[in-house]
Image (tube, rainbow, N blue to C red):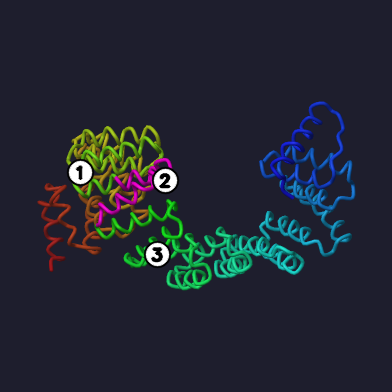
Amino acid sequence: MSFSPEDNNVSLTRFESMLKTNDVFFFDAEEFESIANHYIEMGKIALARKAVKLGLAQHPTSSNLRLFKAELFIFENKFDQAEVILTELHELEPNNEEVFIQKANIYSKQDDHKKAIYLLEQAIDLTDDPADVYNLIGMEYLFLEDYANAKVSFMKCLEVDDQDYSALYNIIYCFDFLEQHQEAIDYLNMFLNKNPYCEVAWHQVGKQYFDLKEYEKALSAFDFAIISDDTFVGAYLEKGKVLEKLGRYNEALENYQITLQLEDPTSFALLRMGKCYDKLGFDDLAIKHFERCVHEDPLLDNGWIAITDFYKKRLNFQKALYYIDKAIQIDADNVLYWKRYATINYRLKFYEEAEAGYRKALELGNYELDTWLNRADILIQLGEADAAIASLTQSMEFYPENAEIAFRLSGLNYNKGNDIQGLYFLKNALKIDAEFAIIIDELFPYVASKKEVIALRKNYEV
């Protein structure tokens, strides 16, 4: 039961006054239910518990208050105590669907989702509101990663209540996960035949066509979404993205501008506007919007990356370094920042800082091949042969059959006088891919001039 605005204030005020004064006021059972439900929705569990306790003191036979008590036990993971209440209620009211739903909730929290689904399916036959139960069944299937059955459950939910857009979003989520874009479009078109002015459905059709790279069809779908609701910000944003793909940057800007008029500026819209101005060659406007973007949302990494790459592209590495430094100060665990930090410092010939950037990227779990190789090459430039060998040896755990790594290890070992190890890695590298032997020429000219190296390379020449 929900409060009307008037009852809400009166009942809550009286209840909270009773708690402060220790006076005992009478509330009917439905008022206690509404008070408890209000506090549960607000996340004020202690107050909800008090409402249920006082409610049962005045109305000890109230099934709904006992259900609230069971729900609170479940919330606190006191499953045995909840089970006792639910078993008693089931004996008194075997057709109370809420008992099945709360029992299913217990099994769900214990990760027994199949048992939860079994109980919820029994609740379907007892409830006057099957949409909610179908939604719960769909969520259980999502926990099981059974997207096909989850999709069916959410579809049944939408059949009962065609205004339940959360169910519609969940259906599309399942289609997306199953990579069934055309099937999603077919389903949405069927839904639109009955609900032709559903802006959410048109929006989702457009996103499916976008994923299929059918941009003109996506554009038409987003236009229909806007016709259905000309204040639908999401449709303007998606339409802008499509127009960018089609190279129609001025039109994209018009759509992003509309979103700024409909609501407070979003970092996404500002970022996209910056990208459009960049494409159109309006540097001042591009940088202005990138700066507004990072001011609006300092945690949006795409914003910092855009402004850094803007200056990198113009070879203004000092400015690029300034912005990537600011980004790292905000989020020092972002791998994308550290890789740019490394490349920018390398272009500025700050080799120790560049090496530190790649090292940090590796520490954060960025095990891409280029990260290992770039760091090793800088260590070689810095004369840190042992560190380069250690790093490349570690990289072999991820790339055990890689010629670029093996050639570097060969050259490094030869340079250190470890000819046996050098020869071992050289043979392996040549077997894997002899074309990368140019690495020896570029990084290790002394090694390239050795007779045994020259002879061995000749055996692999095509």
Q: In the image, what residue type sits under mark 1?
A: Phe
Q: In the image, what residue type sits under mark 2?
A: Leu
The secondary structure type at the circle numbered 1 is loop
Q: Along the horizontal axis of the image, is 42 left or right of 314?
A: right
Magenta span: 248-273
Residue 421 position, x and y percent, is 26, 52
Which mark is in front, 2 or 1?
A: 2
Q: Does residue 153 show up?
A: yes
User: Which residue position is annotated with label 3?
Assistant: 221
Q: Along the horizontal axis of the image, is 322 left or right of 146?
A: left
- Closer-to-camera residue (357/140): 140
Q: Are marks 1 and 3 in contact (CB under 8 Å)?
A: no
Quadrant of the rendered image containing residue 56: top right
At a point 69% along the width and 38% down the height, the residue shown is: 44
Residue 186 position, x and y percent, is 46, 73
Q: Residue furthest top?
A: 21
User: Which residue position is annotated with label 1?
Assistant: 282
Which label belongs to residue 262?
2
What is the CA distance from the residue labelled 2 to the residue labelled 1?
25 Å
Q: Main secondary structure of the magenta part?
A: helix
